[in-house]
Amino acid sequence: MTTQSQSVVSLADLRQTVERLAMTTPVTDMHTHLYAPEFGDLLLWGIDELLTYHYLISESFRWSEEEYSHFWSLTKREQADWIWKLLFIDHSPLSEAATGFITILKRLGLDVSSRNLDDYREALSRRTVQEQVDTVMQISGVSKIVMTNDPFDSVERPVWLADQGKSDPRFYAALRVDALLNDWPHAVKELQKLGYDVQTEWSQRTKEETRRFLSEWIIRMDALYLAVSMPGDFVYPADDHRSKMIDDVMVPVCGERNIPFALMIGVRRRVNPSLGLAGDMSMRSDVTAVEALCRRYPEQKFLITMLARENQHELTVLARKFRNLMIFGCWWFLHIESMVEEMTRFRVELLGTSMIPQHSDCRVFEQLIYKWEHSRRIIGSVLADKYEKLHHSGWSVTEEEIQRDLDDMLNQNFWRFLGKEHK
Ligand code: RAT
Ligand code: ZN
């Protein structure tokens, strides 16, 4: 008997041990739209921000004839009141995003049964942003947060230029480069404003200057990876701007700086422009683009998530073929309990624990609470099924092994992929 066998978890304790560890293992949230407190107003938090989350905005309009323009002319508080009435009072909050708001109230210790929005506002307004950040990170068990950082954003840029973006060690940067790939004319203007000598034409000088821009900002932000969202009709290789940008600029710079390239594929932006951020749609993608990238650049690491449910199985199979491919998260419209369950199950069945099962995509700080609570519960229950099955075949696991597996999925797979293992 090994010492290990002393902590083998009995069948009777197995499920609740796995579920407890799934709920409590500290998490690295590797893709969010959250900011550290140093970024001031960019860090969204509180009741009105939560209620005006774009996921809830689009759900609200299903119940109303309201003019879009009128909604956008309201104050944030008025918008929140309108959404609260439509989604929580006139109808039951059953959608993932609406249920999530209730989970947040509950975990923050507010009286959910009172349905008194002003009381909730009042309770949170007594907290400072710093207190709320600490409280939410503690409740959600999220210990490391990766932001989404855009040097073209005129509010965000000064924080980095003043060297204040890295003050809170719990927050990490990811350099977002959508415009470079998806709106080159706009990117050219922005780059020129920042002093880079680029032109719309793909000249040698333009390539060098775009590479210089990326390198300088990766260093300035200490960015963990380069990130982009792509439409579903993204093809690679192709005789187009995107392939040139990837081949001549992005992959070389990622290689030089030794960071992964994250592609989030399958979004069709602004199918209903009147809804603003809430007007984007999902779209099926071509997984062979990822296959071609992974094959052509075996030394380059790719973090990949896709938005269409229809792509998930194929993408997971592809991850069996390429170790430089790490699939991550149940993105956006897939971040609903039924999809998280389905995807987590077949990902484990195809890859074991060698993937990143979830990221939050939070935009408002307190959302960390519900997004992680809901996902942790599903991850725990899927894993419990699998360990029980092993147990019935005579393969018992120790608590340490369960903890290791969860730590891999919720932390280490990400950091190891980056070559920055955290202990
Ligand atoms: O999930 C979201 O909030 C979307 O609006 C997008 O931000 C998406 O996650 C993205 O990163 O493009
Ligand atoms: Zn996102």
Image (tube, rainbow, N blue to C red):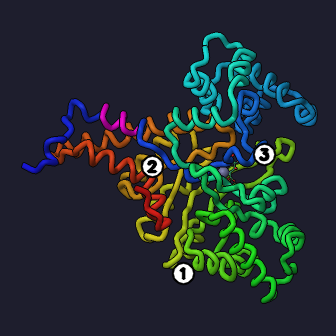
Q: Residues within 10 Å of mark 3 (few under 14, many from 20)?
A: some
Residue 398 position in % (x across, y down): 22, 44
Q: Residue 18: say if magenta.
A: yes
Please name the predominant secondary structure of the magenta segment in the image: helix
Please determine whether, in this image, residue 50 is positioned above or below residue 293. Answer: above
Mark 1 or mark 3, earlier in chain: 3
User: Which residue is under mark 1?
Assistant: 296
Residue 236 position in % (x across, y down): 64, 75
Question: In the image, is 50 to the left or to the right of 276?
Answer: left
SS under mark 3: helix
- Quick one: 300 or 40, which is closer to the camera? 40
Q: CA gap, disc 1 to disc 3? A: 34 Å
Q: Are marks 2 and 3 in contact (CB under 8 Å)?
A: no
Question: In the image, is 106 to the left or to the right of 17?
Answer: right
Give me the residue at 61% from left, 14% from top. Answer: 111
Please determine whether, in this image, residue 283 is positioned above or below residue 44. Answer: below
Q: Residues within 10 Å of mark 2 (few under 14, many from 20)?
A: many
User: Which residue is under mark 2?
Assistant: 410
SS under mark 2: helix
Q: Amino acid at mark 1?
A: Arg
Please determine whether, in this image, residue 110 is positioned above or below residue 269. Answer: above
| Residues shaded magenta | 16-22
